[in-house]
Image (tube, grey):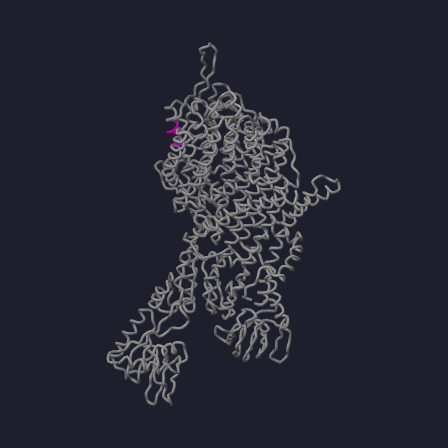
Amino acid sequence: MSQAQSLFTRELLRPALRDALAKLSPRVLVRNPVMFVTALVAALSTAILIEGLLHAAPDLGFQAQLVFWLWLTVLFGNFAEALAEGRGKAQAASLRATKAHLTARLPDGRVVSAATLKVGDVVLVETGELIPADGEVVEGCASVNEAAITGESAPVIREGGGDRSAVTAGTRVIADWIRVRVTAAAGQGFLDRMIALVEGAARQKTPNEVALTILLAGLTLIFLVAVGTMPAFAAYAHGALAVPVLVALFVTLIPTTISALLSAIGIAGMDRLVRFNVLAKSGRAVEAAGDIDVLLLDKTGTITIGDRQASEFLTLPGVTRDALIDAARLASMADETPEGRSIVALAGAGAPLPAGAEQIRFTSQTRVSGVLIGERALIKGAVDAVLRRLGDSADRAAASMLRELADRIARAGGTPLAVADGARLLGVIHLKDVVKAGIRERFAELRKMGIRTVMITGDNPLTAASIAAESGVGDFLAEATPEDKLALIRAEQQGGRLVAMCGDGTNDAPALAQSDVGVAMNTGTQAAREAGNMVDLDSDPTKLIEIVGLGKQLLMTRGALTTFSIANDVAKYFAILPAIFVVLYPALAVLNVMHLASPQSAILSAIVFNALIIPALVPLALKGVRYRPAPAGELLARNLAIYGLGGLIAPFIGIKAIDLVVAGLHLA
Amino acid sequence: MDAQALALFFAYTLVVLALARPLGRWMHALYDGRPLPLCGLEQAIYRCAGVDPAREQGWLAYALSVLGFSLFGIVSLYLILRCQRALPFNPQHVAGMEPWLAFNTAVSFVTNTNWQNYSGEAALSYFSQMAGLTVHNFLSAATGIAVAFALIRGFARAETKAIGNFWADCTRVTLYLLLPLSLVLALGYVALGVPQTLGASVEVTTLEGARQTIAVGPVASQLAIKMLGTNGGGFFNANSAHPFENPSALVNFIQMVTIFALGAGLTITFGKAVGRERQGWALLATMTVLFLLGLVAAYAAESVASPALHGLGLAGANMEGKEVRFGPAASVLFAVVTTDASCGAVNMMHDSLMPLAGLVPLFNIQLGEIIFGGVGSGLYGMLLYALLAVFIAGLMVGRTPEYAGKKIEAREMKLAVIAVAVLPLFILVLTALASVTAAGLAGPAARGAHGFSEILYAYTSTVGNNGSAFAGLNGNTPFYNATLALAMVVGRFGVLLPALAIAGGLAAKKRVPEGPGSFPTTGPLWVALLASVILIVGGLTFLPSLALGPIADHLQLFAH
């Protein structure tokens, strides 16, 4: 699903063309006032053309062409929308196929259709079977392939209790078994929501789209008056203007370009997010992403790579460096955690574990681990834990020096790990959070864009401050509890700022719900997935930054095409006005700055340009304008130059070119 | 462009810009309600009127106060004009005004339009001039500034419904701004030769022995507020072309400066109130750019006289319809200034401008008189365009559009579109109506494209609350008195009410802190963008009518 898809494949184009015709239904058209008005005047022109045919009126060929292009303008708009929807529909179809075959095994062994399941039912799913409904694992542990929804074929572990208990309908258990309690009724699950979403069926106009539609409708009204009053002005000059010509002027002036592409832009924006494996529950959330002022980022996984790494060995006085390294290595060799492996790697090569060595496992009571070689116990662990284990046998002076070393490491943002050989304290290992490569540059970019970043961590303030300094994050919240997070979000929002965060645990749910953009991890609990307004199928908290970019890109595309559309009007006036008025005042021919061949050719060229610009801009509408992080002033200057200035100039060239063709083919 | 014109234009722009800051700061002091030197008098006024200035109003209450106050103004002024024969200060024994004309005049002065379908010296008593018209010159100006204050509060405040108290705003503006400035200006005008008397017209015997009546009266006092409040209604029919209403080049210059002064200052008041004076300077810069563009275009067009005169061996600038005392530069500057603002005072015949020079005043008004603009109305009109510009282009930076710390959403868009659409809607529909009905066609003196320009100008001037006349149009007929009055009412309240509604909505919103991610609404890029949106959205609508009026007129004139 995440693979790139070409914009204009035959499979997409053919249904889009069919849908474009179906969308001519007034009930569909009326949702877009500008296109509705265009269709109305096209119908009016058709009626006038038919009436003219009955009376064998002059200029019928010209009129017929105008009518043809008017309808084509409407169809192109429909086509753009259909094409955007079509890309989603293809995905929806495959999802629906998955869903159709789902069956469920109840505890009594009966196998029923998944559609009959109710909330609270418990089902058993075994190796090779598809999970029939969204739910929580109540018993068992299994690896699940979620490729059907995430596109990621590496299996994930799902087990009861904790933060990895949520399972999704349509995903496949590939090993072991689980019992699942159904949490979503048939038709309301994640898969259903996803189908509705990618199809665009549940799409509602976003607040921003509503505001833009009002502006476009207002401009249409103004131009209706501007054109509607022209016959009266012409009458004053003892002339008359033909209705089809006025219709042509009106349709070219009203913002058909942006109106035709408006819904396609919105659908494509959601679609880009889906391709990025993020599901937004509403278009409003995508827009809000563009407006984000504050990003709350979890330290682990986003700013630092998930695990701490050993970076240094610090010995106590009287202990040789080799003794410490050797003890640390031996104590960690049986330790399969990433921390343990990093200690072995840092220690370098050495003697293997002697035979008969016994591993001392880490438990939450002792909080130390190590190895027992005969009578000799080599242990490592948190400083307090090690000292407690040694008890009175530890040397007082060594213990206090150990604490000093440990404090120094903590102040530098690291985690100290004490090492002891029997009752003898050797020194500490400096475990360090490793900041992700490139994250500093990302934060600098965000800062330039005016977005404040806040690192959320359970670490103490000292450690947090040191990592914050190293990563370049704007601010940090140390020893953060879910309540702190919620309070921080509320405080920022009180100051008029919009906040985005991601989370996966049930205790994240209130903060996810409070934030303006709350991205829940797909591996998270059902509560978290319900509370957020987006779900990241890859469960990658780093993506929050890209989500902001996608939101901005959506808004930018809409703004760029609006500006382009309105700027186009200048050229259209210069094409059509002289053509219309030259019969009243021949001197007005000098306004024909493009030297268009004839009045009829000028009018026809303008209307053809107005229609053709829509499909020409469809790829831009669907792909979105180029986005790179930059301060608003820079973005504005660049986009104004391209779409504002370009919008002024392009139609002069386009209309002139079409006029050459029209005149060359003697179409008018 | 000759050196004299250049020096005049330069000096004028410089003086206006230099006055903006002190005036803007003073108006900010009025805006924020702090106690000022005459506060004892101010409090006494509130006590008499039963107003508690501390009780602020929501936008609807504010709007109803404005409407009620204006309605009272129209009715009372109508009665004064109808009954002026029986009222005092009527040494010429002027008769009461006819009903339609009185209605038109009452609406005209209360809406700050000052369109005059009558000749002041012949049709009005001194009482009507002073207690009727001059009073409304003050009050309509104060109302405009009060509404601008309310809209500024919408931007400056957060999470409140209150946008100020109309009665307090109106009182403070009149008491601390309009009255003292007018007093000083009126005394200055008297010193510079403008009459100020309650005596009857002067009867003189001319050198040829003929008897001549020379009209005088309380001119200086009306002249001061006529300009300062961008009212524009002349004491004399000839307005500021009359030697008593504009005796010298210096008086002419002062008049022009006072037209722009408060409009320029209010931009600074806005910037100061929203916490960034640069916001205000950006608006002022946009106004200045549009003003200079129009001025240069008009002066260039006016520098070439009609080709018809070339045959007579006359070359140089067009002198038709101008006071020789002022010449082309000061006349064109006056025409541009008076239409950029919603003043409408004239020191020449706009009808006699070369077609393209005549286009500029017309276009200025059609843009909504937001270039410095009417006192108050200029600022709120400009802010409405700023909202449109921010919305159209603002999305291009990838954020919901914001202006001066407020998010611009559907409600603001709806109201701004209504306010901006009122102008083309009524100007074009009423012009269309007049150009196809017998009653309308009876108005213009000229035929052809020029006659059309006369009709278009009349409705443009009234919907825009400008009040200047192209002349040549006989507007004192029931058809024109009625439709022009309608035009003035919708032009005033069709913009003012949406502006107040926006103020109410904005005040309730949170303020969004500005940062590098915010759409930049200061600096040259923004100025260029705002000016383009004004020209494209505000101007393109009128291109067809302009093509059939002044542009066709020009092309025919120079066709040979």
Q: From the top left corner, tell me how far across and down residue B191 is, in percent.
A: 36, 24
Q: Residue furthest top?
A: B209
> Magenta span has A180?
no
Number of labelled discs?
0
Quarter of the view holding residue A9: bottom right
Q: In this orientation, which residue lies closer to the viewer: B455 or B419?
A: B455
Asked if residue A390 is positioned above or below residue B344 in the image, the reply reads below
Per the picture, the main secondary structure of the magenta-coloured stretch is helix
Asked if residue A78 is positioned above or below residue A302 in the image, the reply reads above
Quarter of the view holding residue A175: bottom right
User: Is residue B47 in view?
Assistant: no
Q: From the top left corner, tell me how far across and down residue B526 is, in percent.
A: 44, 46
> Magenta span has B184?
yes
Q: From the top left corner, tell me how far across and down residue B37 is, in percent.
A: 34, 37
Q: Specify the quadrant that holds the C terminus of chain B.
A: top right
Q: Start and end of the magenta stretch? A: B179-186
Q: Residue furthest right?
A: A54
Q: From the top left corner, tell me how far across and down residue A515 is, in percent.
A: 47, 61
Q: In this orientation, which residue lies closer to the viewer: B52 or A107?
A: A107
User: Is residue A72 in view?
Assistant: yes
Asked if residue B42 is positioned above or below residue A370 in the image, the reply reads above
Please state if B162 lies on the left or on the right of B481 as rendered: left
Q: Specify the quadrant that holds the N terminus of chain B.
A: top left
Q: Residue furthest front?
A: A664
